[in-house]
Image: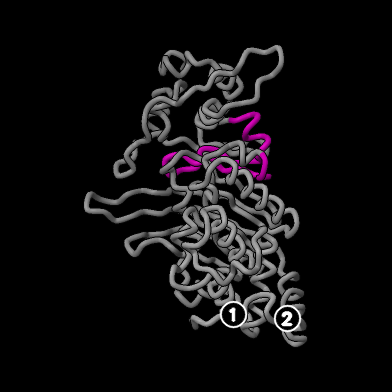
Amino acid sequence: MAASTPPRAGTRPASAATLAQLAELNQRLAWKPAARLQVEGLSIGYSTLRGRFHAVEDISFEVPAGTNLGLVGESGCGKSTVIKALMGLQPANTSVSGRALLDGQDILGLDDRGLRDIRWNSISLITQSAMNSLDPVYTIGDQIAEAIRAHERVSRATAWARAEEMFALVGLPAGRLYEFPHMFSGGMRQRAVIAMALALNAGMLLADEPTTALDPIMQSQIMTRIRGIHAHMRRSMILVTHDIAVVAETCENTVVMYAGKMAESGPTADVLERPLHPYTMGLQNAFPRLPVPGAPRQPLISIPGVVPNLLLPPPGCRFASRCPFATDLCRTTAPPVVRHGAQVATCHHTDRSEEFRAAAARPETWRNMRGAA
């Protein structure tokens, strides 16, 4: 990549040819449809000195075109591993099986050339750590312009003008395109990464915990910005987070993961209001809720125990050791995938979910692990 940059914004207006090419580029990108993603039986494992680490096992979900999917669960459950596999960013010692159909094309196992063709152009990524995803020796503008020109036959001036439009979209002044990543605050770097991810209007946007390293005020601003952009551009998106409140506000559908496996999935309203899996019920209890006038304040209830060792995963349900409703069947036999209307859950006892929801709201249920089964 050339280190030189166009003249600073405002020193020389864009030529008529640049403006005409930019208008043509914008029109071409605007015609891109939102993408549909179908993930089928995705399993991901790492080879380690102690054996195979089962990071993700048999995950399936769909993101209809123009919708948002929330991928939630506690740290280490495999959310980011799924995203890295979709982008082809897994380490060399990784084995990946299953299919991920992006508008009908299986993007798992693509070679380097195939990955270059789809990255930023068809599927783009907002990473957890914006600083680590930006090259420190090139300006932000150079990096966005390079991504554009890798997929579109346009002049450097046109790519720079498109980068200026993307900066305006995320609320950054165009003049900051000439600066290096270390000159940006954390929130500004995150918005710069969002601008790069949107530069080619990719049909599928992957947002991997985009507010993790930010303070609460900046988190709110970034998520408001992402929701506004989605409403304006109607792209498809997978939002990876551990924050159920963000999912409730942003996503039409939700997948809940636990210890590398899918616990539950379905429309967000159904999953959060009428969860079928005890893990989802436990997640809800661990998040604060606004007090209801005249009603007692809902206590925060933590889930006891720890995630199982994925080097030697348990034979039955992976949540059984922490589940207050677990039976001998749960501890010895892997649960089936059970469908209730639009919801899907991997649990032996989905027929008792209403009973479990009432019991899960009481702190003593989780203190007395076996007493409520």
Residue, disc 1: 149
Q: Identify whether 357 is placed above or below 21.
A: above
User: How are the colours assigned in the image?
Assistant: one colour
**Which of the 4 image quarters holds residue 294?**
top right
Callout 2 environment at 10 Å: few (<14), some (14 to 19), or many (20+)? few
Relative image position of residue 220 (x, y in whole percent): 62, 43
x, y percentage for residue 259?
42, 40
Residue under the image location 66 percent in, 70 percent down: 164
Name the residue nearer the viewer: 130 or 110: 130
Amino acid carrying label 2: it is Pro
Mark nearer the N terminus (2 vs 1)? 2
Tell how many labels.
Answer: 2
Amino acid under disc 1: Arg
Distance from Cα at disc 2 to Cα at disc 1: 21 Å
Residue 293's x, y, as percent?
Answer: 71, 16
**What is the span of residues highlighted in magenta in the rendered image?**
249-275
* Residue 228 numbered mark, or none: none
In front of the other: 306 or 44: 306
Disc 2 secondary structure class: loop
The reply to whether the magenta stretch includes residue 252 is yes
Give the numbered dot on residue 13. 2
Q: Is residue 141 magenta?
A: no
The residue positioned 67% from the left and 80% from the top of the image is 158
At 55% from the left edge and 36% from the top edge, which residue is drawn? Answer: 345
